[in-house]
Image (cartoon, rainbow, N blue to C red):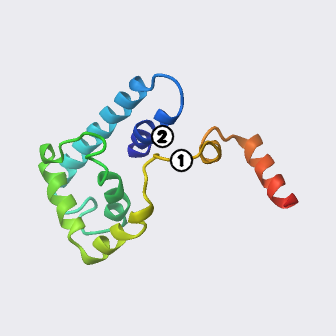
Amino acid sequence: MAGQVSHFVNYAPNFPGDHSYSEKRYKDEYDRLLGVMDRVLAEREYLAGEYSIADMASFPWVTAYKRYEVDLDFFANVRRWFDAIKSRPAVRKGIEVGKEVRNFGKGISKESLKTMFNQDAKSISEMAKAKKEE
C-alpha cells in the first residue's frame, strides 16, 4: 500500500486531474496496515518473531511515514520496531545508499514520466523493439 501512497503523493501531481480521493484512500489503507503491524508487534519483537526478511522487506515502506502525514508515535509498537531496526548498523548504511539522488517525483522529465507510467504490454513491446533497433 505504501507504494500506492507514494504514487499519489509523489508522482500523480505531475499529471492533470484531481487525485485527492486516491491519495486519501491509500493513506488511510497505509494507516490501517500500520495498525495491523502494531497489534502483531505488541506480542513479539519482530514481525515473524525473530529479525527476518519480513522486517527487512517491511522497514523501507514504513520509513516514508512523515511524507504520508502519519504520526508513527500513535503506533507505539511499530515505533519501537522501527527505531530498533533503524539503529542496526547495516540498515543505517543501507539508508545512505542513493540518498543524494532521491527526489520523490520532483524534477522528473516528461519522457521519464512516460517511461515510468502508462505502460502496458504494447508499450513495453514497442520499447523493446526500439531498443533492439538502436
In this view of the protein, which residue sits in the foreground, 48 or 74?
A: 74
Residue lying farthest right? 133
Q: Are marks 2 and 1 in contact (CB under 8 Å)?
A: yes
In this view of the protein, which residue sits in the foreground, 10 or 119?
A: 10
Quadrant that contains the C terminus: bottom right
Badge 2: few (under 14), some or many (20 or more) residues near its Cα, within 10 Å? some
Q: Is residue 115 left or right of residue 27?
A: right
The reply to whether residue 7 is visible in this rendering is: yes
Image spot of residue 106 (x, y percent) = 45, 46
Image spot of residue 120 (x, y percent) = 69, 40
Q: Is residue 111 left or right of residue 82?
A: right
> Circle 2 sits in a helix, a strand or a loop, which is it?
helix
- Amino acid found under the numbered disc labelled 1: Ile
- Image mark count: 2
Residue annotated with mark 2: 11
Identified at 51% across, 23% down, the residue is: 17
Identified at 20% across, 70% down, the residue is: 87
- Amino acid found under the numbered disc labelled 2: Tyr
Identified at 77% across, 41% down, the residue is: 122
Residue annotated with mark 1: 108
Front of the two marks 2 and 1:
1
The reply to whether residue 42 is visible in this rendering is: no
Image spot of residue 103 (x, y percent) = 43, 53
